[in-house]
Amino acid sequence: MISIELVDLRMYAFHGIFEGEEKVGNPYIINLSVKYDERDNDFENINDTINYENLHHIVKHWMDVPTGLLEKICGNIVRHIKHDYPFVKEIDLSIQKLQPPLQNFEGNVGVTMNRKFNE
């Protein structure tokens, strides 16, 4: 099994359900792991693997779409990756909001999604 990973991506986006989040925005950290079987592959060119530049583009695209819940963003990213790479066996995705607008709260909040595909 091969895992292509994007680690500690930092993005600024406008997600949330609290008033003003869609205007002020928030910094996020995203971690993504996409796993697939190597299938007797010699890995001679980019078509023999999953292009991490394309994965970054997918994540950025959905982070640029203001959305209320992080769960929905995760689901959109996972579906997009599976559509582009149908041979994927597992996707782990974590999105952390670094400055949540919560009173008397210090720390991050976030969502982690794990999807396994049996095809």
Image: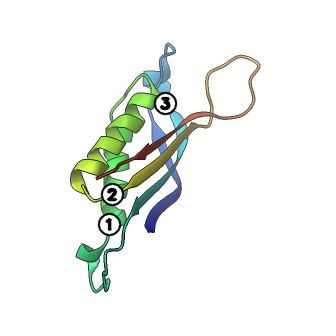
Callout in the foreground (3, 1)? 1
Up-down relation of residue 110 to residue 68 (above or below):
below
Image mark for residue 104: none
Q: Earlier in the sequence, mark 2 or mark 1?
A: 1
Query: What separation in Å lies between label 3 and label 2 (alpha carbons)?
Result: 32 Å
Residue, disc 2 = 88
- Residue, x 42% and y 22% (percent of image)? 68
| Residue 102, horizontal then vertical, whole percent | 66, 19
Image location of residue 72, percent across then percent down: 39, 29
Q: Residue at x 58, y 34 (%)?
A: 110
Q: How many marks?
A: 3
Does residue 64 show up?
no
Tell me the residue that label 3 is attached to. Answer: 25
Looking at the image, which residue sits at the far top? 19
Q: Could you give the CA–CA distance between mark 2 and mark 1, rounded to whole angstroms? A: 9 Å
Q: Nearer the viewer, residue 66 or 91?
A: 91
Above-or-below relation of 52 to 97: below
Asked whether the beta carbons under mark 2 and mark 1 sit within 8 Å of each other, the answer is yes
Give the class, few, some or many, for how many residues have Cα within 10 Å of label 1's Cα (few <14, many ≥20).
many
The amino acid beneath tag 2 is Val
**Lower sequence index among marks 3 and 1:** 3
Instruction: State the image coordinates of residue 7 (x, y, percent, origin top left).
Output: 53, 58
- Residue located at (49% from left, 13% from top): 19
Label 2: element kind: loop
| Other residues around mark 3 within 10 Å, as few (<14) / some (14–19) / many (≥20) | some
Looking at the rendered structure, the secondary structure element under dot 3 is loop
Residue ID for mark 1:
50
Q: Earlier in the sequence, mark 3 or mark 2?
A: 3
Q: Is residue 57 above or below residue 42?
A: above
Q: Which of the 4 image quarters holds residue 89?
A: bottom left
Q: Amino acid at mark 1?
A: Ile
